[in-house]
Amino acid sequence: MSKPKILILTGSKNDEESLRPTCEILDQFGIAYDLIVSSAHRNPDRTRKLAKEAEPRGIKVIIAAAGMAAHLAGVIASLTTLPVIGVPLGNSYFKGIDSFLATLQMPTGTPVATVAVGSHGAKNAALLAVQILALSDGNLKKRLKRFKETLAKK
């Protein structure tokens, strides 16, 4: 198996199921990834280490998914120059609005590309990561183009 190009982080083991659509899309494109649970609040040292070691180990894009306070994507973005895609999850009392706003509202200099709440966002996070990787991979770009053509036909 090839080295992972995408690091998927989630703040809780309970969130892994919400990321199944992300993994399915990446599998469909044959892109290797690591899925790791590491909370910005419960495991700050581990989370910091994962963010700082991502680029040296060949990671090109980080997808960070969290619900409720949803600080994971922002913390990761503050620690790396890699693109970070935030996936707000809807597993809170506010049905994800809180996590959406926490992921979206980042200070200047700490960008997080924020997608929709839930499974649509999980799919779009994977597709955005594929688009980023396709910038430097012609074969992946062709497959992505065919994928989008297929979507248009549906």
Image (tube, rainbow, N blue to C red):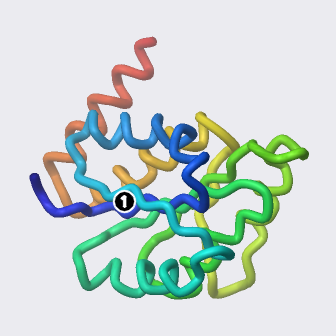
**Residue 129 x/y as whole percent:** 40, 55
Asked whether 64 or 120 is in front, the reply is: 64
Place of residue 88 in the rendered image (x, y in percent of width and height, measured from the top left): 68, 52
| Residue on which the image places disc 1 | 132
Q: Quadrant of the C terminus?
A: top left
Q: Is residue 74 above or below residue 8?
A: below
Can you name the residue that lies furthest to the left here?
Answer: 1
Compared to residue 140, the image places residue 24 above or below, namely above
Residue occupying the far right of the picture: 94
On screen, residue 123 above or below 60: above
- Residue at 46% across / 85% down in the picture? 80
Is residue 137 rendered to the left or right of residue 96? Answer: left
Residue 4 in percent (x, y) is at 23, 61
Q: Residue at x 34, y 78 (%)?
A: 54
Q: Identity of the amino acid at label 1?
A: Ile
Instruction: Count the marks.
Output: 1
Q: Residue at x 46, y 71 (%)?
A: 83
Image quadrant where residue 61 sits = bottom left
Q: Secondary structure at mark 1?
A: helix
Q: Residues within 10 Å of mark 1 (few under 14, many from 20)?
A: some
Residue 122 in the figure: left or right of residue 129: right
In the rendered image, the vertical position of residue 132 relative to residue 50, given as above or below: above
Image spot of residue 13 (x, y percent): 55, 52
Q: Nearer the viewer, residue 109 or 80?
A: 80
Left or right: 154 with respect to 117? left
Residue positioned 43% across, 85% down in the render:
49
